[in-house]
Amino acid sequence: MGHKGSSSAASTLFAWVRRQSMKVKVFLAVTAAVATLVALKHSVKDHNHFFVASEAIHFTGILVLIYKLIRKKTCSGLSLRTQEITALYLAIRLYCSFIMEADIHTVLDFVTLVSTLWVMYMIRFKLKFTYMAGMDSTPIYYIIVPAAILAVFVHPHTSHLQIHRMLWALCVYLETVAVLPQLRMMQKAKMIEPFTAHYVFALGISRFLECAHWIIQVYESGGKYLYLAGRGYLWIPGVFVAEMVQSFILADFCYYYVKSVMRGQLLVTLRSPV
């Protein structure tokens, strides 16, 4: 009875939200985001924990994919291109971590990279007959080339070699847009099965935590954090914008995901029926 009551209340809430104007919906979304940021600011003292949690959640999302590939024997609905871009930025970040700051992040990046490479292997070879190649059509160079050009001009100014600073910037920019092929594929399909939806939702939570780190840092410094001496005048604002873009890219999907879960639906529908 308790579960039915909570489900009914959630359905009523979402029905009420759907009836509101776009301005009200935006206001509600911003209010929820601000409330979450305030809670995180007062509950998490070490801001480094945001990145650790983000990387751990990303790895958890990959584990969900591994479970799907092993138990369901299908990679239907998964974008190989997103996995390839993810593997690329993880490999770059892992290399830079060894050179610049080997720590717990290096370990998390390593296990996530290995897991991502395994997912790519399964899609390319073991389960290629279930791969929806026709729907995974985003040209990968449309994503990599602009990110590489941006990294040449906007990168951190530190004591490390310039090539390493450019590579670090490249992995940040690639991480921002890596999920685009997956989202485009899901938009074409309209209906997303649970395991793929869980994975993308995990990416959404992961990106939100990274974005929360930067927003809180900027807030606590009164905006001065955006232009720290020695970091390059465009680098930190560039990272901040990149994190915001990631969050907005995934926000729409996360809304439909939560709505479907609250309704007890196994499949996530990206557009409500008319």
Image: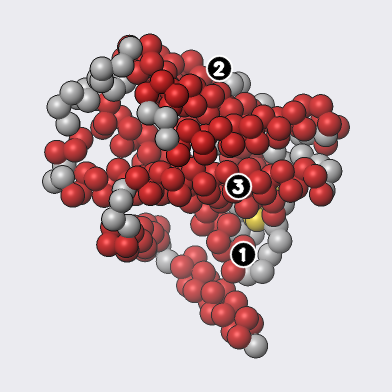
User: Could you tell me which quadrant the N terminus lies in?
Assistant: bottom right
Pinpoint residue 129: horizontal percent, then vertical percent.
86, 32
Please give the name of the residue rendered at 58% of the width and 57% of the height, measured from the top-left corner: 257
**76 shown above or below 19:** above
Residue position for label 2: 141
Residue position for label 1: 261
Q: Secondary structure at mark 1?
A: helix
Q: Tell me the crowding category of disc 1: few under 14, some 14 to 19, or many 20 or more residues within 10 angstroms, Cα based.
A: some
Say which amino acid is labelled 3: Gly
Please give the name of the residue rendered at 55% of the width and 61% of the height, measured from the top-left corner: 258
Q: Give the mark nearest the N terminus, 2 or 1.
A: 2
Q: Secondary structure at mark 3?
A: helix
Say which amino acid is labelled 1: Val
Residue position for label 3: 61
Using residue 98 as the reference point, say whether residue 272 is left or right of it. Answer: right
What's the CA distance linking mark 2 and mark 3? 25 Å
